[in-house]
Image (tube, rainbow, N blue to C red):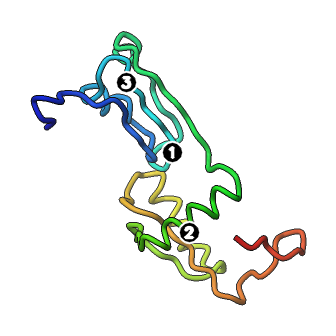
């Protein structure tokens, strides 16, 4: 799968979770890094003894600050990056559809993003009655 002159990766960047350690072991060089920023496939990640013996390092990260989020949105917009969307449910009142999105996540059925489309009138305030922050 990898070229002969580069038989292993330095890092694997993963947003799904689940069995990423198992799937990454054969691809990573000794001392390689798994960078994890999400758990959409499964809410846990098993750390396997072969990863310990190969001295694989796990680094986790969160979404970052609001400023970083704004920068990311600008980057995506400027470069016209289009995310893969698996399914869209319309309206906050579509509870069955929204529950179906969670079912898809739990079962690992989605490939891309699961989206709840909110119309302008659906929610223009937060739960505390204030306007949501502008990004």
Residue at coordinates 40% horizontally, 71% vertically from top-left? Answer: 82
The quadrant where residue 83 appears: bottom left
Tag in front: 1 or 3? 3
Tag in front: 3 or 2? 2
- In three-dimensional space, the C-alpha distance between marks 1 and 3, rounded to whole angstroms, equals 20 Å
Mark 1: which secondary structure? loop
Residue in front for this viewpoint, 31 or 96: 31
Estimate the x, y position of residue 31 in percent, counting from the top left. 38, 18
**Residue farthest to the bottom?**
121
**Residue identified by numbered label 3:** 32
Estimate the x, y position of residue 90 in percent, counting from the top left. 55, 82
**Total marks drawn?**
3
Q: Are marks 2 and 1 in contact (CB under 8 Å)?
A: no
Mark 2: which secondary structure? helix
Instruction: Indicate which disc residue 111 carries.
Output: none
Estimate the x, y position of residue 12 in percent, counting from the top left. 37, 36
**Residue identified by numbered label 2:** 74
**Residue identified by numbered label 1:** 39
Residue at coordinates 79% horizontally, 73% vertically from top-left? Answer: 132
Please, is residue 21 above or below residue 113 in the view? above
Tag in front: 2 or 1? 2
């Amino acid at each position: 799968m990898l070229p002969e002159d580069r038989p292993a990766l330095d890092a694997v960047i993963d947003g799904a979770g689940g069995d990423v350690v198992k799937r990454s072991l054969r691809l990573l060089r000794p001392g390689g890094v798994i960078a994890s920023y999400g758990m959409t496939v499964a809410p846990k990640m098993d750390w396997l003894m072969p990863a310990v013996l190969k001295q694989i390092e796990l680094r986790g990260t969160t979404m970052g600050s609001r400023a970083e989020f704004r920068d990311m949105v600008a980057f995506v917009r400027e470069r016209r990056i289009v995310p893969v969307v698996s399914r869209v449910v319309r309206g906050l009142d579509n509870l069955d559809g929204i529950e179906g999105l969670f079912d898809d996540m739990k079962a690992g059925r989605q490939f891309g993003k699961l989206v709840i489309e909110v119309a302008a009138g659906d929610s223009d305030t937060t739960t505390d009655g204030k306007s949501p922050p502008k990004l």
